[in-house]
Amino acid sequence: MMHSSRATRREVLRVAAWAAAAGAIPLARAQQAWPARNVMMIVPFPPGGGTDAFARPLAAQFNKQTGKQLVIDNRGGAGGTVGASIASHAAPDGYNLFMGAVHHTIAPSIYPRLDYDLQRDLIPITLVASVPQVVVVNPQRIPAKNFSELVKLLKANPGKFNYGSAGNGTSHHLAGELFKMQTGTFITHIPYRGAGPALQDLVAGNCDLMFDGLGGSAPHIKGGRIRALMMAGRQRNAAFPDVPCAREVGLPDYNVTSWYGIWAPRGTSAEVQTRVADEVRKAMATPELKDIWEQNGADFPNLTQPQFASFIDGEIKRWAVVAKAANVRLD
């Protein structure tokens, strides 16, 4: 009887343990559900630039899909490296994301004292948009109607005209330096605290031209406030079929793309990384975002995480060559 009593107690304890574990499963799942609250996404440039052109529509769609807010936190400064630094030190709890850009693969070559390492401290999740850069001018300050007229004007007036950029070391800056090398022209560089402020000054007539990502410039080109003279790359863009590409105007190696992607702080769980990527793909399948991307002349490359990581590595190496050739180095 004593042996039977012990066996019964063991069975009771086993059943109780099983019941407790079973009861805990829904709680554990609830605790692990993502997103359980609003998510913060650092955009390392002021409002109004190319990054915002894609971050904000994506955030609005994320809100519809999840019922939670993807809050955009604009943190401009130092060519996007201030925001990248903040993101790299954020808690890896799944509620801190970072939308960086091509600029962040340029920064390692020109900023010798960054307090973060893009490939060590941030996890690449997905490439969100890829758009060609476009040479745009204020038509009141630069009367050129086409690319050849622009080059002729610049060569006849070295140093007279200026170009605005999103800041020292950004793709806008390096694109301008690459343009100068390939056309044999000299234009004065004016760095701003983001593409948005630079574009505002271009539209207002306080700046002559820009080498801008098409996402930011597109509405102003369509509105006639600025004039597009050349699209970077080897083919015309479907959103602006009348604008010649670099290959057509005699610059076959002028292939500059503005792209935007999402990272998370190192240590963010694999489950959250997968969920973020899934939500982005779901958003990009909607007619609303497809239309916005098309209007901005953008593609959604839909890379896997390993493909995105490999792409970043290639961009870091490519821009290091350009930065060295242009002798761009910043403290």
Image (cartoon, rainbow, N blue to C red):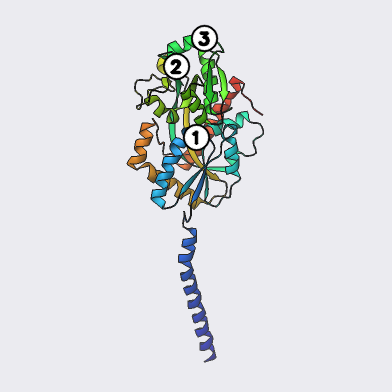
Q: Nearer the viewer, residue 78 or 121?
A: 78
Q: Is residue 256 visible?
A: no
Q: Which residue is mark 1?
A: 311
Between the residue at mark 1 and the residue at mark 3, the CA separation in whole angstroms equals 36 Å
Quarter in which the C terminus is drawn? top right
Residue 120, position in %: x, y?
60, 41
Q: Residue at x 47, y 74 (%)?
A: 19
Q: Earlier in the sequence, mark 3 or mark 2?
A: 2
State the image quarter where residue 189 is shown. Answer: top right
Q: Which residue is mark 2?
A: 140
State the image quarter where residue 325 is shown. Answer: top right
Q: Amino acid at mark 1?
A: Phe
Residue 330, position in %: x, y?
64, 27
Q: Residue at x 42, y 47 (%)?
A: 62
201 above or below 249?
below
Q: Which residue is mark 3?
A: 155
Q: Is the C-beta separation of discs 1 and 3 under 8 Å?
A: no
